[in-house]
Image (tube, rainbow, N blue to C red):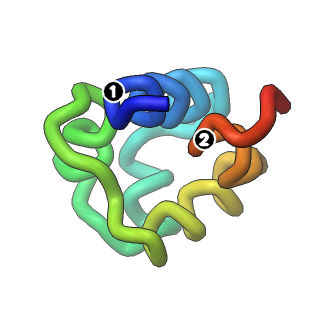
Amino acid sequence: MELKDIQARLRQSIKHSGIMQKEIAKIIGVSPQTVSKYMKEDIFPALDTLAKLCKALDVSADYILGISES
């Protein structure tokens, strides 16, 4: 799996979460602009931030990283 595929899964999970980007940013301790950058494939979160994102979005890191399909 390539980085662009991982970012696409992350972007999709953020969109499908129903949580506003501003709220996600507050939960994981980054700016709303940073969350927007994750969604636009500009940057990828650090591992600790990815873990927080997965928890906030109720999605497994295995899914985001392409290890599993669910």
* Contact between labelled residues 2 and 1, with CB atoms less than 8 Å apart: no
What residue is at 39 percent from the left and 31 percent from the top?
A: 2
Residue 42 position within the rendered picture, expressed as x and y whole percent measured from the top left = 15, 36
What residue is at 66 percent from the left and 32 percent from the top?
A: 17
Q: Earlier in the sequence, mark 1 or mark 2?
A: 1
Q: Which mark is residue 62?
A: none
- Where is 5 relative to 63, above or below? above
Residue 58 position within the rendered picture, expressed as x and y whole percent measured from the top left = 77, 49
For this orientation, the residue located farthest to the right is 70
Residue 15 position within the rendered picture, expressed as x and y whole percent measured from the top left = 53, 24
> Toward the viewer: 22 or 3?
3
Residue 65 position within the rendered picture, expressed as x and y whole percent measured from the top left = 58, 44
How packed is label 2: few (under 14 Cα within 10 Å), some, or many (20 or more)?
many
Residue that label 2 marks? 64
Which quadrant holds residue 63? top right
At mark 2, the secondary structure is helix
At mark 1, the secondary structure is helix
User: Quick check: 61 left or right of 9?
Assistant: right
Q: How many marks?
A: 2
User: Quick check: 62 left or right of 35?
Assistant: right
How packed is label 1: few (under 14 Cα within 10 Å), some, or many (20 or more)?
few
- Where is 26 relative to 43, above or below? below
> Toward the viewer: 9 or 28?
9
Q: Which mark is residue 4?
A: 1
> Toward the viewer: 37 or 8?
8
The amino acid on which the numbered mark 1 sits, given as a three-letter code, is Lys
Q: Name the image quarter holding the C terminus.
A: top right
What residue is at 70 percent from the left and 62 percent from the top?
A: 55
The amino acid on which the numbered mark 2 sits, given as a three-letter code, is Ile
> Toward the viewer: 35 or 26?
35
